[in-house]
Amino acid sequence: MKSKTLTCIICPNGCTIDVKAHDNGDIEVSGNKCPRGKEYAVQELFDPRRTISSTVRIEGAMLPLCSVRLDRPVPKKEIFAVMEEINKVSIKAPSHIGDVVIENVCGLGANVIVTKNLDKI
Ligand code: SF4
């Protein structure tokens, strides 16, 4: 049997959820106050995913760094590989919110996008 106790992060209620996957395939979830919590707990048990916010170097702007984030969650075990790719990147001003800095990072189907507008100086 595979099991986990976790805090649901989908809404501010922060329910403590127990999720168990029995060897016969049955899945038992308790502690969730709504179906979204069940979905989250099952995902966390079998395929935990995370988004990342970070920064990349930017040339020709008032600031040396520009904030970026993933546009969708990626498997938690791939976070370090994604960070390595983000750390290699340098962009040129101007930056615009939503600009794609890395498309399909590490082949995971997520893009790294800009989250700050920075003018060229
Ligand atoms: S289980 Fe539902 S009510 Fe509880 S924290 Fe998650 S989303 Fe919110």
Image (cartoon, rainbow, N blue to C red):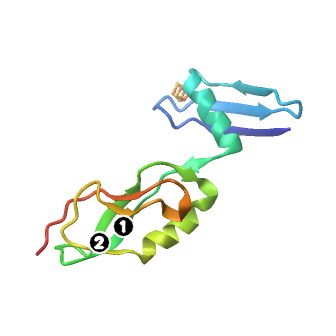
> Residue tagged by mark 1?
55
Tell whether 66 sits left or right of 7.
left
Q: Residue at 85% of width from left, 32% of height from top?
A: 22
- Report x, y in % for residue 84: 51, 72
Quadrant that contains the N terminus = top right
Residue nearer the viewer, 120 or 65: 120
Label 1: element kind: strand
* 32 to 90, vertically: above or below: above
Q: Residue at 49% of width from left, 62% of height from top?
A: 105
Quadrant that contains the C terminus = bottom left
What type is the residue that disc 1 sits on?
Thr
Q: Quadrant of residue 87?
A: bottom left
Looking at marks 2 and 1 on the same chain, the residue that comes earlier in the sequence is marked by: 1
* 82 to 58, vertically: above or below: above
- Report x, y in % for residue 81: 57, 68
- Report x, y in % for residue 86: 44, 69
Mark 2 and mark 1 in contact? Answer it, CB < 8 Å: yes
Q: Quadrant of residue 63?
A: bottom left
Mark 1 closeness class: few <14, some 14–19, many ≥20 residues within 10 Å:
many
> Residue tagged by mark 2?
65
Residue nearer the viewer, 93 or 52: 93
Tell whether 25 sits left or right of 92.
right
Q: Residue furthest left?
A: 121
Tell whether 29 sits left or right of 60.
right
Residue nearer the viewer, 100 or 76: 100
Q: Quadrant of residue 91?
A: bottom left
